[in-house]
Amino acid sequence: MGAYDEGPHIDWWQGLPGTERFVLLKKNGFQDSKKPWKYKELTNKGIYTIWSKERKVTAADLPIKKGTVEVDCIEVDGKTINLTPVPHFSIDKYITHRNCEKCGVEFKKPYDYVKKCDACISSAVREKWEKLPIVGYDGKKPLFLYNSDNQYFFDIGDIIDYCEENEIDVSELMLVTCVKSSFSEIDIEDLTSSYEVVHEDWEPSDAFLAKLAEFNEWLTRQNTNTYFPSNERVVIRKEDFDNESGV
């Protein structure tokens, strides 16, 4: 758009719906998040950035038009071969709202290529979780929040704190048990094939094999202190906790 703060671009938003507050923002500035006692000047370019993020654009606002692109090509055995790469983009990159492909309700997209609304995405995740086999919970095993990236619970206290911080009931949590990892045994192939330290006819001695077996026996008993989510779900109800838990 050129220079936002000079020439014809001064107060470019005049007449656009929902932009009345821009006059005050430009006059008074905006509060600095790092220094709340200060106010920063807001330029026309800054106002345009805010407007771009807030405005609603649907596929109906961007009608697709037919066009032509000139390309270099050759003919090989009667077939036309295009030699010019033709860049192309999806309309999803340019629209802010779309209709959910499952329920049909319009929603604001959190990122470019999402096609389902949050409600349908959450519903699909829960349906998948509910298909997992259910197992009991002894109150001691680590648990994992199925719809999270890295939320583990190592005791009931962790669950209580999470529910209080997020203001949700424990029955809403989609939980799965965790399995503890372990070190894998090392075999001769692991030692020789990757590093090419022996010739192809080399054979380990009995003493070598005995020491390797001894090491493997020790290795598999070492604690990794590392857990991964399993494919078994757990259902915890509010009444499963003591009345004093506060969940």
Image (cartoon, rainbow, N blue to C red):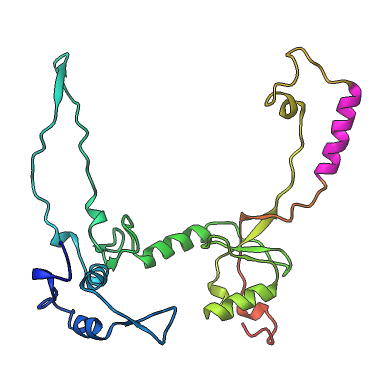
Tell whether 126 sits left or right of 196. Answer: left
Q: Can residue 168 be seen from the camera position used here? A: no
Tell whether 34 sits left or right of 167. Answer: left
Residue at the limit of the structure toward the front, as seen here: 6
- Please tell me which residue lies in front, 62 or 18: 18
- Please tell me which residue lies in front, 208 or 136: 208
Quadrant containing the N terminus in the rendered view: bottom left
- The structure residue drawn at horizontal position 19% and vertical position 30%, both measured from the top left corner, is 84
* Stretch of the chain drawn in magenta: 206-220
Displayed quadrant of residue 29: bottom left
* Residue 32 is a magenta residue: no
Relative to 44, say whether 226 is above or below.
above
Relative to 216, say whether 92 is above or below.
below
- The structure residue drawn at horizontal position 52% and vertical position 81%, both measured from the top left corner, is 167
Q: Can residue 110 be seen from the camera position used here? A: yes
- The structure residue drawn at horizontal position 56% and vertical position 79%, both measured from the top left corner, is 165
- Please tell me which residue lies in front, 227 or 172: 227
Residue at the limit of the structure toward the right, as seen here: 207
**Percent x, y of residue 152:** 63, 64
Displayed quadrant of residue 123: bottom left
- Figure disc tally: 0
Quadrant containing the C terminus in the rendered view: bottom right
Displayed quadrant of residue 61: bottom left
**Percent x, y of residue 65:** 9, 49
Q: Is the magenta region chiefly helix, strand or loop? A: helix
- The structure residue drawn at horizontal position 69% and vertical position 74%, both measured from the top left corner, is 156
**Percent x, y of residue 86:** 20, 37
